[in-house]
Image: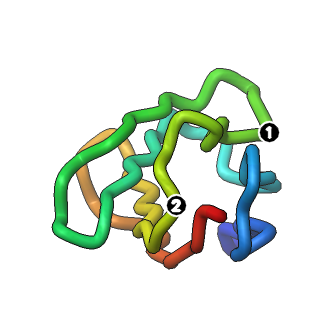
C-alpha cells in the first residue's frame, strides 16, 4: 500500500491538521526559516500539531520514519 499523508492548512493560526494511513512510528519536526529546530512531535494518535507557541513567519514541517528517513516535507505560514 502507498502511504498517504494530508496536512492542512498551509496558513496556520493555532494548529495543523494531519491525516495519515502510516501506522508505523514517526515524528514531525518543525523548523523556522533559519533552519532552527522549533518543535518535535511524536505520533501519539494525535491528529493535530499545536503551533500556538510559534512566532509569525514561515516554517518547514518534516515527517520522518523511525530510521530518520524523510517521508514528507512542506512549508507553512504561521500568522
Query: Against 36, is 39 above or below?
Result: above
Q: Earlier in the sequence, mark 1 or mark 2?
A: 1
Colour treatment of the image: rainbow
Rendered location of residue 19, percent (x, y): 81, 55
* Residue closest to the eye, 16 or 13: 13
Query: Against 34, is 65 above or below?
Result: above
From the viewer's perspective, is 6 left or right of 73? right
Q: What residue is disc 1 on?
A: 47
The residue at the point 45 percent across, 73 percent down is: 58
Of helix, strand and loop, which one carries label 1? loop
From the viewer's perspective, is 9 left or right of 42? right
Image quadrant in which the C terminus is located: bottom right
The residue at the point 75 percent across, 45 percent down is: 14
Cα separation, mark 1 vs mark 2, equals 22 Å
Rendered location of residue 47, percent (x, y): 80, 39
Circle 1/circle 2 CB separation < 8 Å: no
Image quadrant in which the N terminus is located: bottom right
Rendered location of residue 9, percent (x, y): 79, 69
Query: Against 22, is 52 above or below?
Result: above
The furthest residue to the top: 44
Rendered location of residue 50, percent (x, y): 66, 36
Of helix, strand and loop, which one carries label 2? loop
The residue at the point 58 percent across, 31 percent down is: 43
* Among the 4 quarters of the image, the one containing residue 59: bottom left
Query: Against 2, is 20 above or below?
Result: above
* Residue closest to the eye, 70 or 47: 47
How many numbered marks have been drawn onto this rendered protein structure?
A: 2
* Residue closest to the eye, 54 or 10: 54
The residue at the point 47 percent across, 68 percent down is: 57
- Checking the image for residue 56, the label placed there is 2
Amino acid at each position: 500500500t502507498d502511504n498517504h499523508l494530508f496536512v492542512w492548512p498551509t496558513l496556520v493560526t493555532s494548529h495543523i491538521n494531519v491525516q495519515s494511513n502510516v501506522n508505523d512510528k514517526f515524528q514531525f519536526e518543525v523548523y523556522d526559516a533559519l533552519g532552527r529546530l522549533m518543535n518535535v512531535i511524536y505520533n501519539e494518535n494525535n491528529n493535530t500539531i499545536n503551533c500556538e507557541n510559534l512566532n509569525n513567519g514561515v516554517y518547514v514541517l518534516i515527517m520522518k520514519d523511525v530510521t530518520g528517513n524523510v517521508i514528507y516535507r512542506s512549508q507553512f505560514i504561521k500568522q
